[in-house]
Amino acid sequence: MTKNLHPPFKALAPEKMLQLNVEKHARALTELWRTRGGHVYVQGATGTGKSTVARMLATQLKADWFSYERLSPAEFKAERDDIIARLAASGKKVLILDGFFPQYAGGAFSTLLSERRDKGVSLFIFSQESPFPKDNALREGGEFHPGAFETIAEFRYGTRARYPITFHQVK
């Protein structure tokens, strides 16, 4: 009888795979931010780990974290001015906004992004929605400009990737 010299293969539990995914994505976003500076926009479907990455980044970067992920689009629209005021009032150099609807952001968010950048403040926005309009129609409340972001990334469900969620740098 031949002795098996290879250790037994142990598959990682799904929870461990997701944890590794989160750590990997947080490292990638941190490195992009440290290299490029400015604002960062992260888009991804429900369940891709956006909120977990946002919390991890808030801890690692000592950022103020604002969670609005549970708001509906209508609630976000109603709370928009309050959200902007809270972000503007923060004294931190890094801000994390989890839960964002660009179609309701309007020109006020573009102004906020410009003002924060001028003060050396970086804003990470995590959203289920793409920052790019689906058509050429103006967004409600004025124009929101995705060009204000130095980095735009997307979390996607992988098909045959090593990790179940893959990181794609869009800009």
Image (spheres, grey):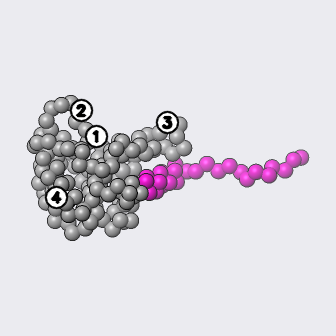
Helix, strand or loop at label 1? It is: loop
Quadrant assignment, res 123: bottom left
Q: Which mark is residue 130?
A: 1
- Figure disc tally: 4
Residue drawn at 30 percent across, 43 percent down: 128
Quadrant assignment, res 129: top left
Helix, strand or loop at label 3? It is: loop
User: Magenta span covers which residues?
Assistant: 1-28
Q: Earlier in the sequence, mark 2 or mark 4?
A: 4
97 and 94: which is toward the camera: 94
Q: Amino acid at mark 4?
A: Glu
Q: List the residue tagged with mark 3.
A: 159
Q: Earlier in the sequence, mark 3 or mark 4?
A: 4
Magenta run includes residue 148: no
| Of marks 1 and 4, the one in the foreground | 4
Mark 1 to mark 2 CA distance (whole Å): 8 Å
| Of marks 3 and 2, the one in the foreground | 2
Q: Amino acid at mark 2?
A: Lys
Quadrant assignment, res 93: bottom left
Q: List the residue tagged with mark 2.
A: 134
Q: Amino acid at mark 3?
A: Thr
Q: Counting other residues with Cα less than 10 Å from the Cα at mark 4, is it few (<14), some (14-19), or many (20 or more)?
A: few
Q: Amino acid at mark 1?
A: Ser
Q: Earlier in the sequence, mark 3 or mark 1?
A: 1
| Residues at discs 1 and 4 in contact (Cβ within 8 Å) | no
Q: List the residue tagged with mark 4.
A: 115
